[in-house]
Amino acid sequence: MQFMGYKRSEGRAGIRNHVLILPTCACGSESSRIVASQVRGAVNIVFNTGCSDVAANTAMSQKILTGFACNPNVYGVVIIGLGCETVPHKALREKIQAMTKKPVVSFGIQEEGGTLKTIEKATRAARAMAAEAGLQQKEPCDISELLLGIECGGSDATSGIASNPAVGNLSDRLVDLGASTIMSESIEWIGGEHVLARRAATPEIHNQIIKVCEDYEKHLLAAGQDCRAGQPTPGNKDGGLSTIDEKSLGCIFKGGTRPIVEVLEQAERPTKQGAIVMDTAGYDISSVTSMVAAGCNAVIFTTGRGTPTGNTIVPVLKVTANEHTYQWMEDNMDVDLSAIIRGEMTIAESGEMLLGEMEKVLNGRLTKAEAFGFSDIAVDHVCRFI
Amino acid sequence: MEIKAIMLDAKDNVATLTQAARPGDKVRCIGGTGETVESRAEIPVWHKIALQPLTKGAAVLKYGEPIGELTEDVEKGAWVSHLNIRSVPRDYAGEYVTIE
C-alpha cells in the first residue's frame, strides 16, 4: 500500500507540507499567531510555557518544540522568541538544526525592537519559505512511512464496545502492511494493564507496561491525587463508564492485537516499527501533543460523547460509534461507526472501512478539525512554575 | 418493550444497554449467553444492567474482566453504575514476570 506524500531528507514522509510558526515560549505565541495568519501555508501553535520552569518541565517543553519542528508534516520552521526565556530562539534553532536539515529561521522580539518589527521579519521569512514549500511535489511513499497516533477522548460505553475495537483492527491491518502505530494514555491502561501486557513482544516490555502504570499511580499519589477519583471523568460516567478499570479495558482495544515492540516516554521518537505504546496523560490534547512531537504524521481519534479536537501539524480523524453523537455533532465527526452497534457491520469490516478513510486523509483529504484549522496543544508538566 | 443490550463475554454479569430502559422492559443480550432479563429500574442508554443478583463486594465483570466491586447488593435487572461500584486498587507486584 502506498500514499502520495512529501519525502523528507531524514525520517518518515510528510502527508502535509506546513510552514510552522513556532514560539519558544508563551510570549512568542501571539506574534506567531499573527504571522501565520498572514501567510497561506503557514500554521502556528500556541505555547503556554517555556519560561520560569523547573528543569523537568523545561526538558518536556523542549522535547515538544523540537519534536514539532522535526515532524514530517512540517516543511520548514520560523521560530519566534522573546529573549529572556529559558531556551531562547537561537539555542532552540540550533537544537532543531542539529536534528533536521529542513529550513529553520528564528527571531527574538526584544532583539528586533518589539512586536511589529518581529512580525514583519518573520512574515517575510515565512512567505519565502511557504513559496518554496509550494514547489515540493508529492511522491509515492510506502505505507511503512506512516506513524499513526491512536487516541480516544470523550469516551462513553460505545467507545470500548465498537469504535476502539474498530480502530484496533485498523492498527492490526496497518502493522501487517508494515506501518507503525502508537497507542498512548497510560493512565487509561490502569485496570487493563494485565491484559495489555499480554501483547508484549518480550518479558522486558511486559514489565515496562506494568511499571508505567504503577509509577503513574505513585506519581499522582505523591501529589495527593487518587487516580480513581479523577478517572473516569464526569462525562465518561454519564456515558456509562463506571470505573477506571472499565474505561481502560475498553480503551486498550484501540491499540489492536499485534505484539507491542516498544514502550516510549512522552514525545519520544520510536526506534522500532510495529505496534508501539507511549506513556502519556489521559488528557487527550496532551496525549496527541506528545504523539505529534514523537513524529506521528496522522492521528485517529475515537469518541463517544463527541469532541472538536484538532492539531495544526497533523490531521486528526474523528470516529464515533454513537449514532446520536455522529448526527448531533456532524461538523466535528469524520466517520460514523454506529453500524457496529446496530449489528450491521463487523469489527473486521469497520477496520477495512477505516483503512480506506485513512488512505484518503494520507492523500490529502482534510479532516473536519483540520478544515476548521484547529490547533489544540497541551504540554504535560510535573511541577509548579517557579 | 424489548431493549437490546451488548454482552461482551459469556462470563459477564452485566450488559450494556443500547437504548434507555424502563422498569418492566425486556432486555435481550446480543452476544455472550444471549439471555434476556427484565429491567427493574430506569436505566440510561449505554449504562449497565445486572444479569444476575449480586451481593455487596462482588466483582462486576465486563469484557470477561473485573471492572470494580459492588458497594451494595443489587437485584437481577438493576442499574449498575459509578453510583454502586468502585474500582479496586491493583496488585502491581504480582503482575511482573520473571526475566530469565
Image (cartoon, coloured by chain):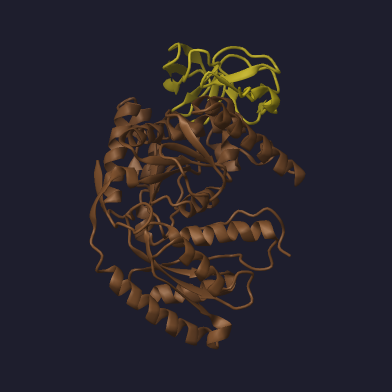
Chain in yellow on the image? B
Q: Residue at x 71, y 43 (%)?
A: A219
Which image quadrant for residue A129?
A: bottom left
Residue A375 appears in the rendering: no
State the image coordinates of residue A352 (x, y, percent, origin top left).
Answer: 29, 33
State the image coordinates of residue A269 (x, y, percent, origin top left).
Answer: 48, 49
State the image coordinates of residue A86 (x, y, percent, origin top left).
Answer: 64, 69
Q: Is residue A121 above or below residue A54?
A: below
Chain A image colour:
brown
Which residue occupies the extreme front position in the image? B100
Q: Residue at x 68, y 27 (%)?
A: B92
Query: Residue B54 or B1: which is nearer the viewer?
Result: B54
Q: Is residue A110 above or below residue A327?
A: below
Residue A306 appears in the rendering: yes
Q: How many marks?
A: 0
Q: Is residue B51 above or below residue A368?
A: above
For the N terminus of chain A, the image quarter is: top left
Horizontal side of residue A359 vs A101, given as left or right: left
State the image coordinates of residue A223 (x, y, percent, origin top left).
Answer: 75, 47
Query: Residue A267 or A329: which is nearer the viewer?
Result: A267
Q: Residue at x 64, y 55 (%)?
A: A381
Which image quadrant for residue A110?
A: bottom right
Query: Residue A276 or A47: which is nearer the viewer?
Result: A276
For the C terminus of chain A, the image quarter is: bottom right
Which image quadrant for residue B57?
A: top right
